Structures are given as structure tokens and as C-alpha cells.
Amino acid sequence: MDTHKLSLVGLTKQYAQGIPPAVDRLDMNVEEGHLVSLLGPSGCGKTTTLRMVAGLMDPTAGRILVDGNEITNTPVHKRGMGMVFQSYALFPHMNVHENVAFGLQMRKKSKKDQEVLVRKALEMVQLDHLAKRQVRALSGGQQQRIALARALVVEPTLLLLDEPLSNLDAKLRETMRTEIRQIQQRSGATTLFVTHDQDEALDMSDRIAVMNGGLIEQFGSPVEVYERPRTRFVANFIGRANLLRVTVRGETPHTRGDSRYGVEIDGFGTFEAIGESGLAGERDLLIRPHRLRAEPASSGAEGIRGVVESLSYTGDALGYSVRVGDRLFSAERLTSGADRMDRGDEAVLSWRAEDALVLPEDVEGSAP
């Protein structure tokens, strides 16, 4: 399958004057063969963006380009894209082979070509043995893969996935996100994937566009958006976060272009943290719960003292909510660790400088 590059330039959707745009001057490149996730809460503009790319909705402004050729005004049936909807939209009166072949029939492919291409698509999703099965007799995961095969069989310029896992149970979702990623990599299809599930985006994507209020707040690899969020929203949306307002007091050059800072937390003193160079004044400090050490006060550890307000057990980890004055900190420890604490116990919180990140100022607008 040929691979293609998607470029969005200033893409905007304004439903009515006087209300904020659903999508606001969005700029983004999806490189050939990459899977890029549009991630964000309901109403952030991710599905609107996907529908504009598909040709199902007209943009108010901006351009959509595939391989440098503008398709902004190209009718949906001439864009050559494959789309998998949240509901899969399979035809219940057709069997698997007939469903997958439907797009080829619309393109006037010969019966011989249809047979070859349908078999190839079903082999790609590892369901060629079910070609004659009625789709209503398939499991949810099998229907999801048939919808993928139907989208891929036409060798689309782009593969567009609109929350395709949302109708599956939690265990099957985890299995299917691995299978979708493997299918996408085998096909080489350049893919735009809409999801509100951070785990799906982190696990499946080459790049993630974190959207909020019609804007892209950050565009980067899964590691970048998780380890180095640029805004408070991204830090809070991707994974769990302890976010503290701090005053930056000093800067010392560190590694890989980072600096080490002294950060003053009101009422608790000054601590060390890292961040990009050139930061000063009031900033947000991020500490992930699994990087915040919570130890019994009886251990003699040094740090900020608080009281365990609640705890949660998830099998491999214990989560603690520790009250320190009017602040509530979240910390996680492996269940294999020693010295389990209970509600009401006094705890000591501490962290390494490398595990505390000073965030840049919040940025408005789209990411390149």
C-alpha cells in the first residue's frame, strides 16, 4: 500500500458567530505511515477535525492537503479515504466477504480483483477463515477487525478511526488496541485516530495531538507528552498528576539542555526540580504519583509530613491520598514494598529533583 502525508493548515470550524470555534486554526502534519492520535475530552474538537479531513464536514477556513495536493473542497467519495466508525457500520444482511468487498464494488473493480483484494484484507486482520460468516454472528472484536478490513481493502490514501474501541469491554479494548496497531503497521496506512482514552493514545501512537477547546496544546511522541508536558492541561489530562504552584528561585545548567531549579512551595520551603532553561517567576510543578515517595513517619525519612486520608488497592500498586494542610497529594507504591500504611497514619512525602518538572507557561494556539 502506498503511504501518504496529511497536512492541516489553519483548519477552523466555526458553527456560529459569537461562540468559540469548535476547531481553531489547527496546524498539524501526519507523516507517511504514522499513526497520529487526536486526544482530548468531549467537545475539544477532535471528531470535528476528523470529519473535516474525511470530507463529511466543510471547514470554515484553512486547508487540507495530502502529499501537498489540496483536497479541502474535494467531495468525500473522491478522497479515497477509509473510515472506521464508532459503531463499525457493517451491513447486517451481508456476510463478511460481502461487507469487505462493498467498497470495491462501488469502485467498479472486477470480480477477480475483488476476490484477490478481499482475501488479502481478511488475511491482514487474520479473519480469512470467516469470509462466509454472517456479521451478526461475529464477536465485537471480530466485527471491529472486519470494519478495519473493509476500510483497508480499497488501499485508502488515509485511514481514519473514530473511537473504534469505545463499544468494547475493558479487556477486549486492551487486546484490540494491540491488534489495530499491528494491522496499521503491516498495512503501512497513514492513520488519524480519534480517542478520549489516554492509555490507547500512549500505547498505539507515533505522535499525539492533545486537544483542548479546539486547540492543540501539545503535539509530540507519547514519551514527550507524558514525560515533558508543556501545559497544566496536558500534564493533568495525560496520566495522573500532582500539580503545585511554585516560585522559581534559581537556575543551574543540568543535562540534555535542562536546568536544575530551586522551587519554593508556599508553606513547605524550597526544593529542587528540573525544567527547560530560562524559567522564572511563578510556575506549575508536576510530580507524577508513582514518582512521589510516601513512607511512614516512623521510618525516619525526611520530607513533607502529612496524614494518609485514603488508600486504594489495584493489585500491583497501592495508592495513597495524603493530606498536607489544605493540599491533597497522590502517591503510589508497589504492593511488594514494605511498610504498608493505613488511613490516619502519619506519612512523609519526598521526591528526587529529576522527578519534579517545572512546566513552561501555558501556550495558546496550535502546535506545528
Image: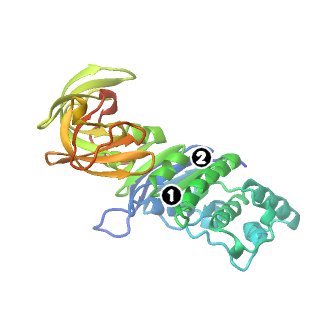
Q: Is residue 169 left or right of residue 324?
A: right
Which tag, 1 or 2, sits closer to the chain's start? Answer: 2
Outermost residue, bottom side: 93
Kind of residue at disc 2: Lys
x, y percentage for residue 159? 62, 56
Q: Is residue 360 left or right of residue 314?
A: left
Q: What secondary structure is found at the residue carrying circle 2?
A: loop
Q: Relative to 204, is 170 above or below?
A: below
Q: Is residue 96 left or right of residue 258?
A: right
x, y percentage for residue 133? 77, 71
Residue at 59% from the left image edge and 46% from the top image edge? 5
Q: Is residue 8 visible?
A: no
Q: Decide which of 219, 18 is in the foreground and name it.
A: 219
Disc ID at residue 194: 1
x, y percentage for residue 154? 72, 60
Disc ID at residue 5: 2
Q: Relative to 162, is 254 above or below?
A: above
Residue at 35% from the left image edge and 62% from the top image edge? 21
Disc ID at residue 252: none
Q: Decide which of 102, 226 is in the foreground and name it.
A: 226
Kind of residue at disc 1: Val
Q: Decide which of 134, 351 is in the foreground and name it.
A: 351
Q: Quadrant of residue 78?
A: bottom right
Residue at 79% from the left image edge and 56% from the top image edge? 120
